Amino acid sequence: MSSTKRILVFKWKYWQFQLFGWSLYLLNEISSAWNAINFNQGFALRFISTFAVLYALLELNRIFYRQIFNRIANPAVYLIIASISSFICSFFWREIRIILDAVFFNPEVKWIEIPRNFEYLSGIITGTWVPFVWSILYFGIKYWQELISERERAQKAIVMAQQAQLQMLRYQLNPHFLFNSLNSVQALIHENPDQADDMIAELSEFLRLTLRYNNRVNISVAEEIEITKKYLLIEKIRYEERLNYTINVDEEALAIEIPCFITQPLVENSIKHGLYANPNGIELKFIVSVTTTELSIEVANTGKLSTGWRIGVGYKNVKERLQNSYPGKFRFFLNESEGLVTAKILISLLDEKTQIHNN
């Protein structure tokens, strides 16, 4: 099911729950009132008005709850917030009912002069159950919706990881990649046998590492860096002095898990487009840093931003996988400044899926 269709289904279910719940509530209130007093025009107007006020207060709560739900993932916090918010809602509902009673039944009584005694407080507490039940149902439905969405994202992540793995295998076995690597080995065999041996060893290790994570959706930053280092070593042997690189990684970031091979397209495109713009050579920087709230992955190279970066398959692949793994929890930048082309990924660590294992 597409995300748009799923949202429409949940909205429809939400309004179904609303209609069913409020219908039961209104039937109960009307039957109770009918037995208690004569159901006249004034009472009907008061009844409709107070219900409209309650509904409006709960709709305001819904706006507030939506913001809470998007920022906090803790059922205990939901319960506390629902309790406090329901009491406040009941207070305003009680006050408005006092005003309406004064207007429709006792116009000579000023509502502000009505005593706020124990009975008044008891009425507020008693009236809390309606917004409280509504709030619990709201958070329950939202939580259920999030669980289903999370399951669909996990399934999609597995499929995309498999596709990424197939793409990696295609990179590994790409005739162009192997042709250049083997040509370099062939030239080095006569010029520098030791270096040729090193390149064969690095190429073999690179292929072995990528196959090791064949069934993994996420790997640690440390494992991702290990793969990247092997790839850069191969490219360094191929391009020699035309390629220089540095890798700087915060130690605190090493245990954080990220989508497998998410940096590979960035590094590959950085070398490809960087050397295209600067055939004489480039400097490449691979930087991973972390704060208490955000993980930063940055790949920068000397040169100019080429059109290929913006429409390339690698760029789209990275963005789609990030969107699937961290919907609304990441930012991706691609820009050129002061002779550097920088691709930067920022991932929020406030999401439960992205945590430092040592915590």
Image (cartoon, grey):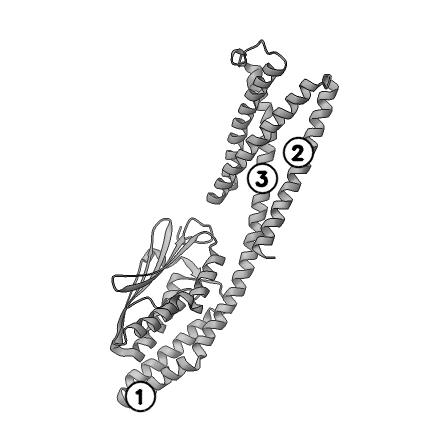
Q: Secondary structure at mark 3?
A: helix
Q: CA distance from mark 2 to mark 3?
A: 13 Å
- 57 to the left or right of 22: left
Report whether residue 128 is seen.
Answer: yes
Question: Residue at (44%, 52%) from the top-left corner?
Answer: 329
Up the image or down, 199 lies above or below 1; here it is below
* Residue hosting label 3: 138
* Label whose residue precedes the other's in the sequence (2 or 1): 2
Name the spot of residue 64 as percent of width and height, x first: 50, 37
Residue 20 vs residue 260, the one in the foreground: 20
Q: Nearer the viewer, mark 2 or mark 3?
A: 2
* Label whose residue precedes the other's in the sequence (1 or 3): 3
Could you tell me the amino acid type at mark 2?
Trp
Could you tell me the amino acid type at mark 3?
Tyr
Up the image or down, 26 lies above or below 252; here it is above
Structural crowding at the residue carrying mark 1, measured as other residues with C-alpha within 10 Å and reported as few (<14), some (14–19) or many (≥20): few
Quadrant of the image for the N terminus? Answer: bottom right
Label annotation for residue 187:
1
Could you tell me the amino acid type at mark 1?
Ala
Q: Secondary structure at mark 1?
A: helix
Name the spot of residue 261 as percent of width and height, x first: 43, 66
- 298 to the left or right of 17: left
* Residue hosting label 2: 22
Report whether residue 215 is seen.
Answer: no
